[in-house]
């Protein structure tokens, strides 16, 4: 039993990945190089353990740590995702958990903070890659975190943020260096425009950082 579909990361259609899912064998082929040929990419085949779920393992599969790229104005960014496929009749529903972002250390008011810039990809995001902000005390940097509603540590990336009694205007920037997209962030005081903190060095992409973000992409197979 074989199902076909497309993962759409942006509405523009520039970041689509076609796939073939062999539901009997628990195997997935992805067109990672986006040339329309799913047979010429040796790194595009993934296997999922066949497990019982909802009475039929052929209707559900999970694939871990899939490397992908996507467009930013500054170039191609690398990411890592977990992909879940679920079949409902002729329709294939997919859930993507992103496992990559930009992470770094910043200092505000004499205290170290973990700062993360997380991509928000999905067919409901229009043609732009949106971002969320992770901001929490540095001593918690090894803990997992959630992205989305109910999270106290992440938010849609704001232009302004308050820490204690201080207000800051945030500026982020992406640059392509040595084939990778790096991120930087500067926080300037509301009151006098002076630099009040920011990443201590450009942040490189971080993979498998234990963040959990879901985005559903649907297409009839």
Image (spheres, rainbow, N blue to C red):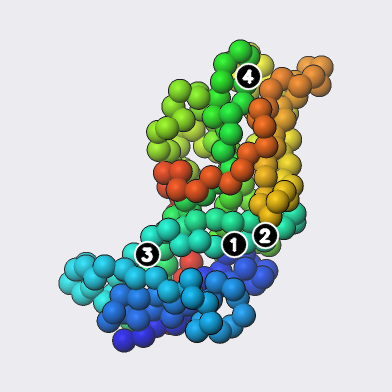
Q: Is residue 22 left or right of residue 138?
A: left
Q: Quadrant of the N terminus?
A: bottom left
Q: Quadrant of the C terminus?
A: bottom left
How far from the left and from the top, in percent, is residue 55? 17, 72
Dot 3 falls on a residue whose secondary structure is strand
Q: Residue at the spot x=26%, y=67% of the render?
A: 49
Would you place residue 45 above or below residue 121 in this image? below
How far from the left and from the top, in percent, is residue 199? 65, 30
Circles 1 and 2: CB distance less than 8 Å? yes
Q: CA distance from mark 1 to mark 2?
A: 6 Å
Circles 3 and 2: CB distance less than 8 Å? no
Return the residue at label 4.
108
Dot 2 falls on a residue whose secondary structure is strand
* Numbered tag placed on residue 63 in the rendering: 3
Specify few, some or many for label 4: CA neighbours under 10 Å numbering under 14, 14-19, or 20 or more: some
* Numbered tag placed on residue 5 in the rendering: none
Dot 4 falls on a residue whose secondary structure is strand
Q: Based on the displayed image, in which of its 4 quarters is residue 166 positioned?
A: top right
Q: Based on the displayed image, in which of its 4 quarters is residue 97 positioned?
A: bottom left
Q: CA distance from mark 3 to mark 2?
A: 23 Å
Q: Residue at the spot x=45%, y=48% of the render?
A: 208
Circles 4 and 3: CB distance less than 8 Å? no
Q: Based on the displayed image, in which of its 4 quarters is residue 117 positioned?
A: top right
């Amino acid at each position: 039993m074989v199902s076909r579909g497309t993962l759409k990361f942006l509405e523009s259609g520039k970041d689509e990945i076609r796939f073939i899912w062999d539901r009997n064998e628990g195997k997935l082929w992805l067109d990672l190089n986006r040339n329309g040929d799913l047979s010429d990419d040796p790194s595009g085949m993934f296997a999922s353990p066949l497990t019982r779920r909802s009475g039929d393992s052929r209707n559900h599969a999970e694939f871990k740590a899939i490397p992908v790229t996507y467009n930013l104005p500054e170039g191609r960014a690398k990411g890592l995702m977990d992909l879940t496929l679920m079949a409902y009749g002729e329709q294939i529903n997919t859930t993507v958990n992103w496992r990559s972002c930009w992470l770094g250390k910043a200092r505000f008011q004499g205290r170290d903070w973990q700062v993360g810039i997380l991509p928000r990809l999905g067919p409901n995001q229009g043609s732009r890659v949106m971002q969320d902000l992770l901001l929490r005390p540095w001593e918690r940097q090894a803990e997992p975190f959630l992205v989305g509603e109910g999270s106290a540590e992440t938010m849609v990336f704001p232009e302004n943020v308050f820490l204690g009694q201080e207000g800051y205007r945030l500026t982020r920037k992406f640059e392509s260096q040595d084939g990778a997209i790096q991120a930087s962030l500067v926080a300037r005081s509301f009151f006098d425009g002076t630099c009040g903190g920011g990443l201590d060095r450009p942040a490189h992409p971080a993979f498998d950082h234990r963040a959990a973000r879901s985005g559903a992409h649907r297409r009839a197979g």
